[in-house]
Amino acid sequence: MMKNDLDAVSFRDLEWSCELNFKKYSNYWHLYTDGRDADIMFRSAEDMKAGMNIIGLCCLYFPDIKAFTFELMNNHLHMILAGDRKRCEALFDMIKGRLAKYFTRNGIIVDMHKFNCELIEITSLQSLRNEIIYVNRNGYVARPDCTPFSYMWGAGAWFFNPILSHLPYVRFEDMTVREKRQICRSNDVTAPTGDIKVFDGMILPACFCDIEAAESFFRNAHHYFQQLTRKFEAYGEIASRLHETIFIADEEMYSAVCMLCMKLYDVKNPAQLTPKDRIEVARKMKQDYNASNRQIKSILKLNKDTIDQLFPPDA
């Protein structure tokens, strides 16, 4: 058998294994909250730690719900879950209720009526891969000082990253009552069953997210990384559906536009485009990549009035 034949067999076997892993669970969901009009809720690292711990404890109270990954932003949340829809909504209600108590106790004024969840059903393996990657890119896209493997406030950094399993954690059961109260953000230190590990005042995401199961939906680490850095069109579609404005970092957007320039006009970069072609590329950027008006202006050097006519900000 030739090497190419072996590679093809290996590819088919790996894909089949991923499909089998996908079929182990049912009712996959992308749970998200709309950040467009939401108040900034998490205003410091301590607030983010509180949010992480509240999410972790609540997930552990719902053993029938499988959490694969999540990302916490300063005013919204993304989670990839599997389980009964009503139970997923109940999990979110618990998270919302505990966050509201934390904000009240700490004098943080937040309109929690704006913090509501939507659930999008995920019905195929590739869709699940796209949604996981979209969630794990969220912090990276919003924070120019982060990569998908360094954003602290979620589970994305744990994917195919065994180094994190060696963090010098402390088990929750071995902590003092005072320390437990700090983790629970409550005088009630009753915790759900499970091996809860804490590092730097934060419950480790691997305690309540099944990272290994989530990794099994990808053929290997190389496949995950390729999906993380390449499938811009798929992530643009998700961003539009979730009403999120930016999902590709500026550097990635520029690379994507250069590829468009070569593919459509046989030129290496947007500086070589004619004014008419720049308008067409602007439309492609908005349609295919959900580019912001700022990104279009910066990359194509178009006049702001022209861009606002093409894509009215209010729309």
Image (cartoon, rainbow, N blue to C red):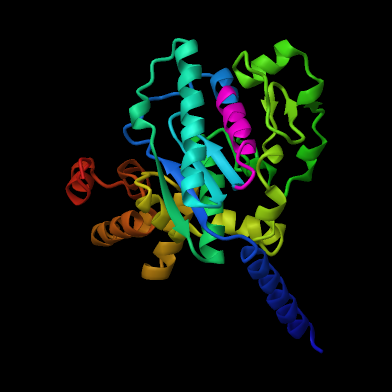
The quadrant in which the C terminus is found is top left
Measured as percent of width and height from the top left, residue 172 is found at 76, 25
Q: Toward the viewer: 91 or 241? A: 91
The question of residue 112 being in magenta is answered with no
Residue 152 visible within the image: no
Measured as percent of width and height from the top left, residue 37 is found at 31, 32
Q: Residue at x 53, y 44 (%)?
A: 79
On screen, residue 156 versus residue 174, left or right, reads left
Q: Residue at x 43, y 66 (%)?
A: 262
Compared to 120, does 110 lie above or below?
above
Most frequent secondary structure within the magenta stretch: helix
Q: Toward the viewer: 70 or 25? A: 25
Image: magenta residue range: 50-64
On screen, residue 128 versus residue 169, left or right, reads left
Q: Toward the viewer: 183 or 269? A: 183
Measured as percent of width and height from the top left, residue 181 is found at 66, 15
On screen, residue 70 versus residue 196, left or right, reads left
Dividing the picture into quarters, in which one does residue 156 lie?
top right
Measured as percent of width and height from the top left, residue 139 is found at 53, 38
Q: Residue at x 33, y 50 (%)?
A: 300
Compared to 99, does 182 lie above or below?
above
The quadrant in which the N terminus is found is bottom right
The question of residue 51 being in magenta is answered with yes
Q: Toward the viewer: 86 or 204? A: 86
Residue 21 visible within the image: yes
Compared to 238, does 62 lie above or below?
above
Dividing the picture into quarters, in which one does residue 268 lie?
bottom left
Query: Furthest residue to the bottom?
Result: 1
Q: Residue at x 79, y 28 (%)?
A: 169
Report the number of numbered marks: 0
Compared to 195, does 85 lie above or below?
below
